[in-house]
Every structure is written in C-alpha cells, then in structure tokens.
Image (tube, helix red, strand yellow):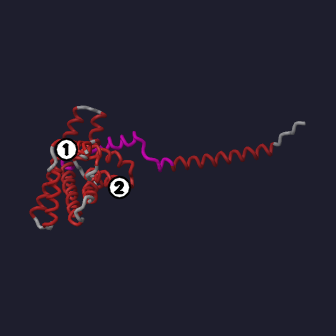
Amino acid sequence: MTKAPDPAADRAAETRDAEMSASRANISNREVEDVEARSSPRTPVIYEIVRRSGEEEMERPLTSLWWSGLAAGLSISFSLLAQAILQHHIPDAPWRPLITSFGYSLGFVMVVLARQQLFTENTVTVILPVMAEPSASNFFRAGRLWAIVLLANLAGTLFAAAFCSLTPALTPELKAEAIEISRVILSHGAIDTVFKGVVAGFLMATMVWLLPSAEAGQLGVIVMMTWLISSEASLISSPAAWKHSCWC
C-alpha cells in the first residue's frame, strides 16, 4: 500500500536542504575570499604591474628622474661602506666573503624600498612597455630614462666617493678596506666581467619580477638576490674558473 505524502515533512526537508545549501554557499564564499587574499598574483598580473611601473618611470619629468637617480647613487654607496665595515671586523678566513657580501645588500635595500632610480634596476621594468609597444617614441623614452638615471647615479657615487676620500668621515682603516674591495672588483678581466654582468643582470631582473608577489617579504627578496650577486658563489664563476674546475 502506497504511503500518502506528508506535506509538512516535505516542507521540513526542503527547509533543511535550503539551510544546508545556504551554509555551503556562505562557507564557499568565505573560502574563495580567503584563497584570493592569500594566493600569489598570477603571472599576467605581475607582468602588468611591472609594465605599468615601467610606463610610470618613463613618463617622469627630467628633474624628478635626476634627483631620484642622484639619491640612488648616494644610497648605493652605502653597500661599499657596509662591506668595508664587515670586512674590517671579521677575521680573514675563506668564508669571510659569504658574510661581507651581506653588506652589498644594504644599498639596494635603501634604493628599492625608497623607490629611487638605479640604472641596474631599470632593466625589465623599462623593457616590458617597450616590447609591448615597440614604437620610436617608446625607444626614445627608454633611452632618455637610462641616460638620465645613469648620469645621475654616477654623479651620486662620485660625490659619495669624494666625500669619503677628502673628509675625515671614515677612519683610515675603513678607507683602506673600501679601496681593497674596489681593487678586487676592478681586477677582473673583460670576459670575466661580462659573464658576471650577465648573471647579475638576470638576478636583478628576477628580483624586480619577484617583488610584486613578495609583499611583506620584499626585504628578504632584495637581500637574497643582491647577496647572491655579490658572493663568490659557483653560479657567478668566470669561464676560467669553470675551466679550472673541469681540469681539476
């Protein structure tokens, strides 16, 4: 015998189903918002952030670029000073360059977090808008930015060098350490310098690409990448060193 349908029971079941569906929908919405808040930006988003940053930099007036580049030249000089301080206080040992290389990061932390104009940082940032629209106007704007920033950076570092050399701002010991560090850098041959520059340029572009998704971890990204550029890691070895390691 077929049981007669109970309208009250059906309505109660429908009510329970509706409440469960609403609950699942609410949880789902909250989860979606949580995932969106915690997830890293997608590659197209990072691309657009970097590209727009490049557009903004190329549109800045000459005076703005000059003073920002001059400030970057002064700030980056603290990398050498920090390295000299560390080298002066750390005993001479095979592992000392791994520690003193952290001093190299100081100037970049100041430049990047203060959003100053540094020539070596304006690589992928400027190239993206130019490649997105390779017009004569964009090539001119990119060349204009690079020329102004490079001259301003050189002027800033020249002033910092003159100030440290001609005034008693630094002790003779720190001056000697800074000169020794600079002498080592200048002792590299042309081919060695080119290969080091290629790797350093790639790491610098990678740093710029990582910063939009790093958020609170930007400091760690800057320190990690610039330390790797400065350190004597095997990734930045010269061709001669690779040949020597192969023969050994």
User: Which residues are the magenta region?
Assistant: 35-64
Circle nearer the viewer, 1 or 2: 1
User: What's the distance in space between the residues labelled 1 and 2, CA to CA?
Assistant: 28 Å
The secondary structure making up most of the magenta span is helix
**Looking at the picture, how far across and down is residue 35, in whole percent?**
50, 48
- Asked if residue 122 shows in the view, the reply is no
Residue at screen point 35% across, 49% down: 211
Label 2 sits on residue: 220
Mark 1 residue element: helix
The label shown at residue 192 is 1
Comparing 95 with 106, the one in front is 95
Comparing 217 with 26, the one in front is 217
Please tell me in which quadrant of the rendered image residue 248 appears: top left
Residue at screen point 16% across, 53% down: 184
The crowd level at tag 1 (other Cα within 10 Å; few <14, some 14-19, many 20+) is: some
User: Where 136 sits versus 94, above or below?
Assistant: above
Mark 2 residue element: helix
